[in-house]
Image (spheres, rainbow, N blue to C red):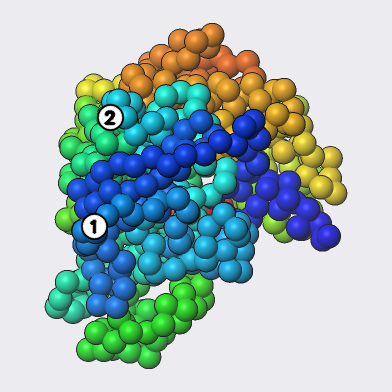
């Protein structure tokens, strides 16, 4: 087995699976199964009782977006008679194969397909009891992933915390975000992938009471690309009445690309296909595999995973002026979500994840290697200051640890900006966290401990950490899943035996430090936060002195982020 594959195995999958750090669910005694039924507005569905809960898998929430419906807004599903089986995971959205998807499916779910507008429900019982609903948006940077991935299986959350978990598949990549509305007449949607999520959320609001859920207590949450999707939902006026709280995890999208950028991307796509805008009707019949080839070939020109606009954005959520009328948090928090409590945070060692699939050299760098790897983003005195700042803040860190701290820090910095924008509304609380479990597992071929990389939160918050894992990891998973379920129940993340989690304010900056022993940290990494603040202020002053007043952050701050996303 190659060293790269060994590092993939370390996290239990690859970038193409949202369950990158997933572990098998624990075995349950018995194995008794029986069917359960529930009514929807479109017909009855039959789920399966398994592991002490009921699972409704592959429930349609919209018509298949095929042919003439390919780039349109989702349409309600057709009604059916009798009882429809919902006992198998549905097709993931059309995407690059690999990782947990496998070449033709993986036994858990079939191969990706354009026929993907289905959702999964995990519930203690379809008994009309009004339980909190946890509506999860899977990660994958708008390009990959599935609402059926192993690490985010909702079984344990439903078992342990009396909640209903809902996860959708929705259009991704070019099929989800190619914007044709300014190039041709017709029913061409903007942000059709986000409209799919909106349709799934609307379906949940209208039907979940028959599945044991409370339509008046729906939490929207997601990690990485799913965190960006959650921020988009938080910014969509049409979603405001459909959910009641949100959690944005390991993503900090202050701003989205613009409508003009999305149109420019569409023009580029047409050019690569050898088409003009007059040929747009032909797009409905071009094989999806050909469209995916174009998407993959253009990936290098895509948008950063955290939502910062690029001159020519990739395929993802953008400000279209209607579905998404404004930037999520760059100009303050959206007013129509003002009364909705929010959680926001990151993993302590986010960018470690993005180096696990290449040569392990970065985990062994010395001082010269540290400076060399950062020099593409920072130069001269600025590079000296940032290294000195982080060395003071983390005096025992190795050069490799400093590298990952520095490259992770902008994600944390922008998560703080989201919390500050939310707190400034004085309408509903915002709760800040950092997953800081120091996983001692070493990266293969090195002595570098894994720590808490990007995606390590997935099995933690879903309580999908097996009994064979280290006690500290199991304890961290108990804490994190209980806090998230507490937020779903009450709008405040609380769990028995854990410290009271205060709301975040710019005055004390209370942050839940999530570990085997949780604690409240006040303004963690303060010196690093102030460094970014001073750098931004210096940039703004320089711009004004040069006769320009801009609201954008320095490009150096933006480009310091990793170029790949889950």
User: Residue 338 appears at what percent x and percent y?
Assistant: 22, 30
User: Residue 544 appears at what percent x and percent y?
Assistant: 31, 46
**Residue 128: mark in rendering:** 2
Residue carrying label 1: 81
User: Residue 28 appears at what percent x and percent y?
Assistant: 63, 32
Residue 157 appears in the picture as rendered = no
Dot 2 falls on a residue whose secondary structure is loop
Dot 1 falls on a residue whose secondary structure is loop
Mark 1 or mark 2: which comes first in sequence?
1
Q: Nearer the viewer, mark 1 or mark 2?
A: 1
Query: Taking 356 as reference, is 458 above or below it?
Result: above
Question: Which residue is located at x 70 percent, y 29 percent?
Answer: 467
Query: Taking 313 as reference, is 298 above or below it?
Result: below
Question: Which residue is located at x 51 percent, y 72 percent?
Answer: 296
Is 441 placed left or right of 119 in the picture? right
Residue 79 appears in the picture as rendered = yes
**Of residues 401 and 142, the one drawn nearer to the viewer in this rendering:** 142
Spatial separation of the CA atoms under disc 1 and disc 2: 22 Å
Query: Taking 296 as reference, is 17 above or below it?
Result: above
**Of residues 392 and 107, the one drawn nearer to the viewer in this rendering:** 107
**Residue 499: mark in rendering:** none
Is 396 placed left or right of 24 in the picture? right
């Amino acid at each position: 087995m190659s060293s790269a594959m060994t590092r993939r195995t370390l996290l239990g999958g690859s970038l193409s699976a949202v369950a990158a750090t997933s572990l098998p669910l624990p075995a349950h005694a018995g194995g008794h199964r029986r069917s359960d039924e529930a009514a929807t507005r479109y017909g009855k569905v039959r789920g399966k009782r398994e592991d002490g809960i009921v699972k409704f898998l592959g429930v349609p929430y919209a018509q298949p977006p095929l042919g003439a419906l390919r780039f349109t807004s989702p349409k309600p599903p057709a009604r059916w008679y009798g009882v429809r089986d919902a006992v198998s995971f549905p097709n993931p959205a059309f995407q690059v194969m690999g990782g947990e998807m496998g070449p033709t499916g993986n036994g858990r779910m079939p191969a990706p397909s354009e026929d993907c507008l289905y959702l999964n429900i995990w519930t203690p019982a379809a008994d009309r009891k009004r339980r909190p609903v946890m509506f999860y948006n899977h990660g994958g940077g708008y390009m990959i992933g599935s609402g059926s991935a192993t690490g985010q299986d909702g079984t344990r959350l439903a078992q342990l915390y009396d909640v209903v978990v809902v996860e959708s598949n929705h259009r991704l990549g070019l099929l989800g975000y190619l914007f044709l509305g300014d190039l041709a007449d017709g029913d061409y949607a903007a942000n059709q992938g986000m409209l799919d999520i909106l349709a799934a959320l609307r379906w949940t609001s209208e039907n979940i009471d028959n599945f044991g859920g409370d339509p008046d207590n729906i939490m929207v949450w997601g990690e990485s690309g799913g965190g960006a999707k959650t921020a988009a939902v938080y910014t969509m006026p049409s979603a405001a009445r459909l959910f009641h709280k949100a959690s944005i995890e390991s993503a900090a999208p202050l701003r989205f690309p613009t409508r003009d950028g999305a149109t420019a991307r569409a023009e580029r796509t047409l050019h690569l296909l050898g088409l003009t805008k007059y040929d747009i009707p032909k797009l409905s019949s071009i094989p999806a595999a050909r469209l995916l080839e174009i998407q993959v070939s253009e990936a290098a020109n895509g948008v950063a995973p955290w939502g910062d606009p690029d001159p020519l954005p990739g395929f993802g959520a953008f400000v279209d002026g209607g579905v998404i009328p404004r930037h999520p948090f760059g100009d303050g928090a959206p007013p129509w979500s003002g009364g909705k409590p929010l959680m926001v945070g990151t993993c302590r060692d986010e960018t470690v994840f993005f180096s696990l699939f290449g040569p392990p050299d970065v985990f062994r760098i010395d001082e010269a290697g540290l400076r060399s790897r950062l020099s593409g983003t920072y130069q001269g005195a600025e590079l000296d200051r940032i290294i000195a700042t982080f060395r003071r803040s983390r005096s025992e860190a190795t050069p490799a640890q400093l590298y990952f701290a520095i490259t992770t820090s902008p994600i944390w910095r922008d998560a703080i900006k989201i919390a500050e924008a939310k707190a400034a509304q004085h309408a509903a609380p915002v709760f800040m966290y950092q997953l800081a479990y120091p996983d001692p597992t070493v990266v293969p071929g090195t002595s570098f401990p894994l720590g808490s990389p990007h995606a390590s939160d997935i099995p933690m918050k879903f309580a999908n950490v097996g009994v064979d894992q280290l006690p500290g990891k199991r304890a961290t998973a108990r804490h994190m899943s209980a806090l998230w379920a507490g937020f779903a129940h009450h709008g405040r993340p609380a769990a028995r035996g854990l410290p009271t989690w205060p709301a975040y304010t710019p005055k004390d900056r209370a942050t839940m430090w999530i570990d085997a022993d949780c604690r409240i940290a006040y303004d963690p990494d303060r010196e690093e936060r102030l460094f970014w603040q001073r750098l931004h202020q210096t940039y703004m002053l320089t711009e004004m002195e040069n006769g320009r007043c801009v609201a954008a952050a320095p490009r150096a701050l933006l480009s310091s982020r990793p170029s790949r996303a889950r």
